[in-house]
Image: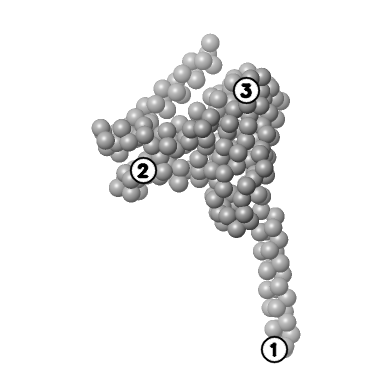
């Protein structure tokens, strides 16, 4: 292959890669579309899966962990909840905190889902600019009573949009946990917080197992 043909060959390859990159960027799921899809997946599973309807927490936890949690930025969420003490924690302590906090959130969210029956989710129009890298997606959970406010903070990453905070009825999740964690850290330090989270998760797991035996 002569020099001219070689240049043309690489030009075509470069153009193809550029077009593919542009297509990938255009095809990236918008934040409100992501929340709408996740909400739909969750509600469809609750309404069609007999084990989930029966309150099988183990099945719900597995579903949440596989479907919802890959779209959550646990590192940022955990760091924000721990606050200034996060920077003082060792890499191993940060890893343990993230693992235990994830377990806590998965079980809390799963427990809430086990109570869902005929609700639907309405995603409100997104107020954001195309260049924004952080947005709030506002939704309402509609059921028999008054609508419940449920909002999401998301950030744009190389792998798509990721959730890093939730707002239920006007209360942001990270702020709530930050206050609780600060009290534990002040009293017992980072290791004390890890121990408290571990014990709480074990108690939750034991309670769920007892409930399944009844």
Q: Which image quadrant for residue 157? A: bottom right
Q: Quadrant of the N terminus?
A: bottom right
Tell me, for residue 83, which label it has, or none. Answer: 2
**Quick one: SS at disc 2?**
helix
Q: Is residue 111 visible?
A: yes
In the image, residue 101 sits, relative to residue 133, either above or below, namely above
List the single residue furthest toward the top. Answer: 214
In-front residue for pair 162/139: 139
Mark closer to the chain start, 3 or 1:
1
Q: Which residue extends farthest left?
A: 187
Task: Tell me if mark 1 has few (under 14), some (14-19) or many (20+) residues whose alpha carbon lies within 10 angstroms of its own.
Answer: few
In this view, the residue in front, 71 or 66, is 71
Q: Position of residue 61 (x, y in %)?
A: 55, 30
Q: Residues within 10 Å of mark 2 (few under 14, many from 20)?
A: some
Callouts 3 and 1 close, C-beta under 8 Å: no
What residue appears at the point 58 percent right and 31 percent down from the top-left corner?
149
Q: Quadrant of residue 36?
A: top right
Q: Residue at label 3? A: 146
First-in-chain label (1 vs 2): 1
Residue under numbered circle 1: 3
Q: CA distance from mark 2 to mark 3?
A: 34 Å
Vertical relation: 67 (above or below) 207: below
């Amino acid at each position: 292959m002569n020099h001219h043909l070689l240049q043309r060959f690489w030009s075509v390859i470069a153009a193809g890669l550029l077009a593919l990159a542009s297509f990938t960027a255009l095809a990236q799921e918008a934040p409100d579309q992501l929340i709408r899809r996740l909400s739909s997946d969750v509600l469809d599973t609750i309404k069609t899966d007999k084990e989930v309807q029966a309150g099988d927490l183990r099945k719900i936890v597995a579903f949440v962990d596989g479907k919802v949690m890959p779209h959550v930025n646990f590192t940022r969420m955990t760091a924000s909840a721990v606050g200034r003490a996060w920077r003082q924690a060792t890499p191993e302590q940060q890893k343990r905190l993230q693992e235990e906090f994830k377990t806590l959130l998965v079980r809390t969210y799963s427990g809430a889902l086990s109570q869902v029956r005929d609700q639907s989710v309405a995603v409100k129009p997104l107020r954001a600019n195309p260049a924004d890298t952080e947005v709030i997606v506002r939704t309402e959970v509609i059921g028999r009573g008054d609508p419940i406010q449920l909002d999401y903070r998301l950030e744009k990453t190389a792998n798509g949009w990721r959730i890093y905070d939730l707002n239920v009825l006007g209360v942001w999740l990270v702020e709530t946990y930050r206050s609780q964690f600060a009290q534990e850290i002040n009293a017992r330090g980072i290791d004390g917080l890890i121990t408290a989270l571990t014990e709480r998760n074990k108690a939750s797991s034991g309670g769920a197992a007892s409930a399944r035996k009844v």
